[in-house]
Amino acid sequence: MCGIVGYVGNKNACEIIIQGLERLEYRGYDSAGVAVCEKGTFKTVKTVGKVAKLKELVGADGLKGNVGIGHTRWATHGGVTTANAHPHTDEKHMVVLVHNGIIENYKELRDELVAENVHFSSETDTEVAAQLLARLYDGEPVKALCQLFKKCRGAFAFVLVFGDRPNELYCVRKGAPLVVALGNGEAYCASDVPAVVEHADKVIFLNEGEICRLSTSGAEFWDLDGVAHQRRTVSVDVDRAMIDKAGYPHFMLKEINEQGSVLRRALFGRTASDLIDLSGEWGITPEKAKTFKRMDLVACGTSFYAATVAQRVLEKYLKVDIRVDIASEYRYRPLRAGGDTIAVFVSQSGETLDTLEALRHVKELGAYTVAATNAPNSSIAREVDDVIRLNAGIEIGVAATKTFTAQMAVLILAGLYLAKLRGELPGADEKRLAEAMKDLPYKVEQTLLLKDVVRSLARKFGAARDFLFLGRGVSYPVAMEGALKLKEISYVHAEAYAAGEMKHGPIALLDEELPVVVVAPADELLEKTLSNVEETRARKAPVIIVTTENVPDVNDVSGTIKVPMTEAELTPFLTVLPLQIFAYESALLRGCDIDQPRNLAKSVTVE
């Protein structure tokens, strides 16, 4: 979950690395560090805190050189200290190394090294790798890296320099992502594309178990047996405007406001002529579609809630057993999946480790696998049978917003298309939903104009330390997502419940101090949800209702937010928006770090 950047060439390495780390700060911001080769010797600067502090220290220090590596840390092993910040080195400074991931057997390896009188200066598993590699190294880098790889268990990405080869960078990948990019007499590597996109539009995504050497001559590749092979670059389609705030105070606010255009991209070409058609990108045949008896939707966090919305929409049309599961649970369960299962893995980054491992697990059982991802060159995308792109553009804010919208759209479209191939989607429903979905981008933009109403409610409840969110049907996962957003960026305790479950426990919490946010659009469950509102009001809890314009006002509530009308199945696209804005405004009032909330990282590449 850390950010890595490396550079070798003829430019100032430190400037390029710092710029890249700024682009990757969403991956980790507990501490940061950089090591640059100056006249054959590596000089390291590292600090607790964000890249801005590192930049300040480096500016005062004046690092010069054309080769270097940098890192932003999300702490796993060892506290947030300067000593634990990367880069790390061995006792003799033969190896300088940065690392993303977790070495699961680090304690065993550390004990072996301590028994050999190796002295450690940090608590990290990363230093174990540096010390071990220095002991394995006999002048042949690839040989030593093959040995290191086989000794380390877990998921990791290493970028490093050997002291006697100061003009070469070495990259090793197992589980955690790494990408390399080539220029004219220079080369880059990073954890993610945003760090290199300003320098190159063609990249190489390292494969599992691959070793790469970067120099001014280009890139060379080996497998874990030390056998050399060739790799080709691929183009990356990245809108550079996506990695700029464009005048907004925070990326999260910018990305909330991009959701109309995100929906247009997600729908483009898939709802033409009021038909739902994914044939241009998804090669599944009607014959194959009819073999499925089970659909598993597997995801984590916000992606899990998007998948849950899709499940509730699709089970009306798609006549298979649809299940939603959290990836970290799914991968360890005794699954009954097989050749009659379509398993859809939902991941914005395409690198979420739990989701990736779940994919590998079910693929061994013979399931047909599909990725719904924003990263078509990611690890998950490369290992599935088919990919359905979100087309949301890069999302920088750690708290997902626009990708939640894109995921709902893509999952619903894919499920409806599958139902169509199976002959289970009535033509009238296809036309109705396709027409309604094409109208959604405009209704999203209408809903975003309610920001002043939402802001006033956020101020009204600015002192609240607890919230309860309620919803039924498709609105239940919306309530869960709303509670998650508030927790993530405002650090406010928020729980979400299916509204009908309130009487089975949460009602005991209700009093004048507990605000209750109820998601209650006009659908077949509206009357029942409003009954829950009455039960809440009877306990004197303040109520905020998010509903649609055709629902009559409810008396004696603290606030009502009315979004435009749409088909009942599609209300989550609109009702989630005020909840995103509410979380943003609440965080702003509390002075929280909105784009980089404490303890969180954008891409969860550790278990």
Image (spheres, rainbow, N blue to C red):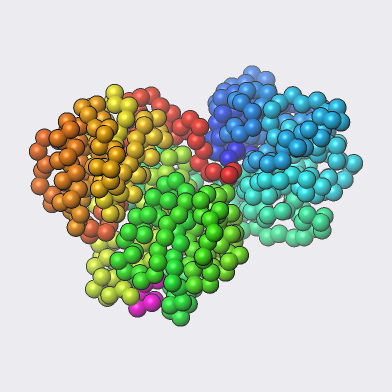
* Picture coordinates of residue 407, whole percent (x, y): 40, 55
Foreground of the two, 594 or 488: 488
- State yes or no: residue 420 in magenta: yes
Q: In this view, does 176 lie above or below 275?
A: above
Quadrant of the rendering where the C terminus is positioned? top right
Tell me if 95 is positioned left or right of 534 in this view.
right
Main secondary structure along the magenta-highlighted residues: helix
Q: Residue at x 22, y 29 (%)?
A: 511
Q: Does the magenta stretch include residue 461?
A: no
Kindly indicate the quadrant of the structure image that contains residue 546.
top left
Residue at the spot 74% in from the left edge and 50% down from the top edge: 212
Residue at x 33% of width, y 65% of height: 315
Q: Residue at x 14, y 35 (%)?
A: 538
Residue 132 horizontal/vertical position (percent): 80, 37
The answer to whether residue 226 shows anywhere in this view is yes
Question: In the orientation shown, which residue stands out farthest toward the front?
Answer: 504
> Is residue 24 positioned above or below 224 on the image?
above
Q: In this view, does 548 lie above or below 483?
A: below
Q: Give the range drawn in magenta.
A: 418-423
